[in-house]
Image: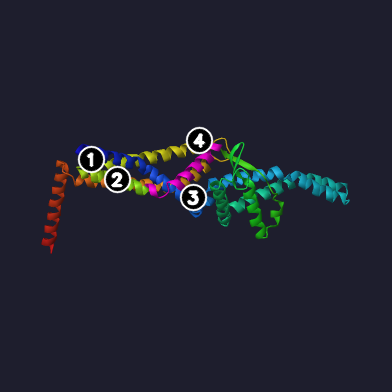
Amino acid sequence: MSRARALASAVAIVLAVVCLPLSILSVWARVQLVDEDAFTATLAPLARSTAVQDTLIAASTDAVDARLDAEVLTGSIVDGIIGLGVGDRAADALRRLQAPAAAAVQGLVHDTIAGAIRSDSFGALWDQLLRQSHRALTLAATSDGAGVVVQTEAGLGIQVGAVVAGVKEHLSAQGVAWATLIPSVDHVVIIGSGDTLAAVRSGYALGLTAGWWMPVATAILFLTGIALARRRLDALRRAALAAAAGLGALLIAAAAGRAAVSSAATGTALTPAAAAAVYDQLVSAAVGAAGAALAIALAVAAGAWLAGQSARAAALRRAWSRWGLRRAAADESSD
């Protein structure tokens, strides 16, 4: 009977240790991928990330340049003026000004887009885009291009047109006349393969199905394993150390994931710095929870060892008791 009890205790503790990292991930997936408000709040600070801003500016200006030919625009204006009959010298002067004017128009559009994305008011537009992206991902409605995040034959991408349209609308509302020069664009910037979207959907499914019950089941397994053990303090110490090892492995995996994401971004429109910024912000809650749980596990293991029956623990307790008595005596004598 005692052997079966010990085996049941060991099995429960092992299952609890295995489930602990999965519990953190399931709660993270539930909060970040299922809850739109939490997802938006988590990624909202990226609107102030220089790396993300630079990526959005580069993608938006490239998309606008593909639709807005500044040389053709200024050329048509110059031809119209010359057609009014301004004379040969004036016409020649206008022709000479055509190239600088085209460069000025292109620079003005670029500066206008960059200024809008770097402004404090861009945060509201960013929140709106995040909500659209979340709905596109969680509802699996990305294949038709309706969302900001879309799935194409080339891979997972960001529909830059939504960003450009939002910037143009924001500038027009502020009365910026040059906003009319920004054309509508239909351009997708590829940021990863289809496996990326599959991973997000898997995380969504994990959060939706496992949700909040996995942490509860993990806690029950831990308590059951410790309750069935003959030496409960020893079982508690070993369980805490094993849990700490599992949590440490989860933190190492998170760090490795960051490196993998940065490496995968090489060669795409998303720079490694921007990819790392997005990854850090997205998993910050899971990493923070794992770090806190690791600290608690180590503290529990230390407490269980200190309360145990080993000679070193007993000696440490006696030393602590003697120190406390001397401290109390010193306080009384000082009074």
Q: How is the image coloured?
A: rainbow
What is the spatial separation of the Cα atoms under label 2 and label 3, in whole angstroms? Answer: 28 Å
- Proximity of marks 4 and 2: CB atoms separated by less than 8 Å: no
Q: Residue 5 has which mark?
A: 1
Q: Position of residue 327 (x, y in %)?
A: 14, 56
Reading the chain from its start, which is encountered first: label 2 or label 1?
1
For the stretch drawn in magenta, the main secondary structure is: helix
**Mark 1: amino acid:** Arg
Point 25% across, 37% down: residue: 7
**Mark 2: amino acid:** Phe
The quarter of the picture where the N terminus appears is top left
The quarter of the picture where the C terminus appears is bottom left
Given this view, does label 2 or label 1 mark the residue nearer the observer? 1
The picture quadrant where one finds residue 124 is bottom right
**Badge 3 is on which residue?**
34
Residue 259 visible at all: yes
Reading the chain from its start, which is encountered first: label 4 or label 2?
2
Neighbours of disc 3 within 10 Å: few (<14), some (14-19), many (20+) = many
**Badge 2 is on which residue?**
222
What is the spatial separation of the Cα atoms under label 2 and label 1, in whole angstroms? Answer: 14 Å
Reading the chain from its start, which is encountered first: label 2 or label 3?
3
Q: Which residues are magenta?
A: 193-214
Task: Name the secondary structure under disc 3.
Answer: helix
**Badge 4 is on which residue?**
263
Given this view, does label 4 or label 2 mark the residue nearer the observer? 2
**Mark 4: amino acid:** Ser
Q: Position of residue 143 (x, y in %)?
A: 61, 42
